[in-house]
Image (tube, rainbow, N blue to C red):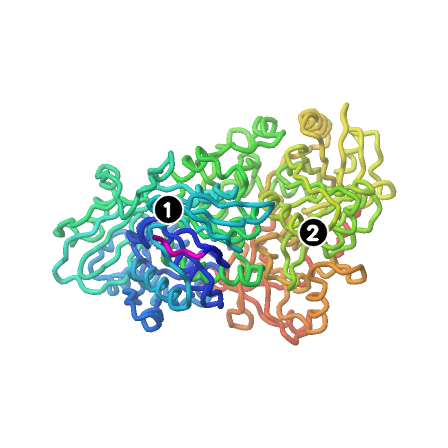
Amino acid sequence: MTNLPKKARCVIIGGGVMGCSVAYHLTKTGWTDVVLLERKQLTCGTTWHAAGLIGQLRASANMTRLAKYSADLYRGLEEETGLATGMRQVGSISVALTEARKEELYRGASMARAFGVPVEEISPAEVKERYPHLNIEGVKAGVWLPTDGQGDPANIALALAKGARARGAVIAEGVKVTGVAVEGRRATSVSWEQGGERGEIQAEHVVNCAGMWGREVGRMAGVNVPLHACEHFYIVTEPIKGLTQMPVLRVPDECAYYKEDAGKYLLGAFEPNAKPWGMNGIPEDFSFDQLPEDFDHFEPILERAVNRLPMLAEAGIHTFFNGPESFTPDDAYNLGQSLEVDNFWVAAGFNSIGIQSAGGAGMALAEWMETGEKPFDLGDVDVGRNQPFQGNRHYLFERSKETLGLLYADHFPYRQKATARGVRRTPFHAQLEAQGAVFGEIGGWERANWFASDGQEREYQYSWGPQNWFANQAAEHKAVRENVGMYDMSSFGKIRVEGRDAETFLNHVCGADMSVPAGKIVYTQFLNSTGGIEADVTVTRLSETAYLVVTPAVTRPRDQVWMQRHAGEFNVVVTDVTAGEGVLAVMGPNARTLMQKVSPNEFSNDVNPFGTAQEIEIGMGLARVHRVSYVGELGWEVYVSSDMAGHVFETLWEAGQELGLTLCGMHMMDSCRIEKAFRHFGHDITCEDHVLEAGLGFAVKLQKADFIGRDAVMRKKEAGLEKRMLQFRLSDPEVMVYHNEPLIRDGKIVSYLSSGAYGHHLGAAIGMGYVPCRGESAAEVLGSVYEVEVAGRRVAAEASLQPMYDPKSERVRM
Ligand SMILES: NCCCC(=O)O
């Protein structure tokens, strides 16, 4: 007979390391009324067979912060709970077998320095010294992270569960969740079943920690949790004579990781063609189970491993293991408040790094649940980043074949996914393809990134330096700066806000003043209560009662839900109309001439000044043009309903021939926008970057009635800035920056670049980054000597508070 409560503040579904960590952290926050329901036994899904590597360096500062937190937490768990966690700080070594990988590791080491993770670049001889068993043939270099470690996954989970229980959590095993009841935007209860007995717990919050069952549990509440299980292979050897404690070893070029444990080796693989599993749902009774061996699949890894670690040749294989783990479409886990149900939370899909992530992810989620706001930027893993279609099982199946292997693939800049492509195409797709477009993908959208010239191969050749499209990007950039270019921005999120209260509602949600005449376009941010930036949008007033909010492609679902959550008593309807209109951006000093050739309307500064929209005739159709620019040039974004999009493209393209109109891609846009120091949401501006520190105070109107974040803006105005966003131009034109390169001020690392790209007009790599500046004037901040560290080398950089390109914004007003 189960003695479960009828009510709880929080019900956690799933008793793997993640569920245990959420229970641990919620109870630490003071939530005693927490119930965790595990369908079989704690750890029986994935946790029990995880390898337990505790690395700390992740792809961004906050992900690293969470992984570091996990390592620190696990170190102290034994003392707190009395349960041994097997946590050992053995350090880790990653080795490079190619020059490209060496550059990646060295760039990673620089990043580690920026994020405060101890790190050392080591030569092949030093690798050998630290790892004598390794055959260093072909090894170009290595990186040593002395504070990395390893632990026992099941014991870590059990220790977290014990800690949670000690603070009042109820942890029930053998209880299957059968449903989640939802009313409006709120989950109300969780139904359960145990050996024929059924019941229900009314819950204020529900957390989905169901691991590879996470997608199905999400669906119980109508919540999208994209993930798919894949087979993950490793072997464990018999004890090897003379094998003593060794660092964790990664040889990503051979898809392999190695962990020494009790004198045995665990050798695991992240191979390029993974095997998705559980296509028709994960069996309900799956518990401490393994999948069938597939020696043919693992053999190539093993063969290379025996060459790399010759002592394996003598070792007997004790276990050939194949177990399922869940993978997401972008290899980042799903964490946070679901978009669909306000009190339904998610922590699932850990892409084989569940143990190192669980501590930090549990801490961050508990803080988020406690305050209702993200404790810091979690954009990389926020479950709200997912697009609705990404819950499609066929898509997940196709994509997960690739994502497992991408963990150890070269992480080249601009690398595009090869699988599950072509899901979302703009109305111009076929026309762009016919003109040589090379597409990239984001949020399922196929976007022309660059245009190949005649005879040029339409494929990326990746590297850490200028890639094969560098000259194409340069030509497209030049066209936009000097003549006229056209590019497809149909992937913009487009959200209509309509109703009697549209104006007052948007004034409440946006920092800028929305009481503007119809036809006016306003650049603005949605702020949170700390003045951080939740969304970066343009809003066009279409009529007395209707506005169009235009968002970056991938943030549309989140931005829309942000508005819906704040709609409260306002009389407004918020509708996604993204697919209804294609958008062509026509940009450059000759943009007006081109527009005038295809339309009888006027495009003068008098009729259609910068920051205004007008309805026009174009060719034989109609469109609405927005005079704005993300590239810093005179230009119009042409919004055309999807049915007339093909015609409008033809009209502009044909008329543009005698002007030398150039088709351009997203890489051109990035190069132009960084020269103009336009911020990029998700990199330069996030929920933890205060709008004033981001240099966007000009877009905030304090004189209007109250709006979300106003108090925080007032407070910052009084207290002064803690950091400032600067633009940097590197002195060495050969060096490329992407983001996260350490920023050095007067010889000391002070932060890192939030974004970077090559500026073809300025003739150098350009970066953006925050510099701490408490109590300093702008002149003092600019008076320092700046450098950027790239792959271990410090490169001098010129700093500026104003955009280096067209600081007075004269060109957009031409
Ligand atoms: N579960 C294996 C983790 C692999 C890694 O940390 O590199």
Q: Is residue 427 visible?
A: yes
Q: Residue 810: x and y, percent?
A: 77, 51
Quadrant in the rendering for residue 361 = bottom left
Quadrant in the rendering for residue 398 = top left
Is residue 3 magenta-colored? Answer: yes
- Tell which circle, 2 or 1, labels the residue nearer the N-terminal end: 1
Q: Which residues are magenta?
A: 1-5
Front residue of 25/330: it is: 25
Q: Is residue 61 visible?
A: no
Q: Nearer the viewer, mark 2 or mark 1?
A: 1
Labelled disc at residue 87: none
Q: Residue 299: x and y, percent?
A: 22, 41
Is residue 430 magenta-colored? Answer: no
Residue lying at 82% horizontally and 38% vertically, measured from the top left: 603
Q: Secondary structure at mark 2?
A: loop
Q: Is residue 432 above or below residue 715?
A: above
Q: Residue 96: x and y, percent?
A: 33, 53
Q: Amino acid at mark 2?
A: Gly
Q: Secondary structure at mark 1?
A: strand
The count of marks equals 2
Q: Residues within 10 Å of mark 2 (few under 14, many from 20)?
A: few
Specify the principal SS of the magenta part: loop
Q: Residue furthest bottom?
A: 775
- Disc 1 marks which residue? 197
CA–CA distance in space, label 2 to label 1: 40 Å
- Disc 2 marks which residue? 568
Q: Note whether ligand 1 is within 8 Å of mark 1.
A: no
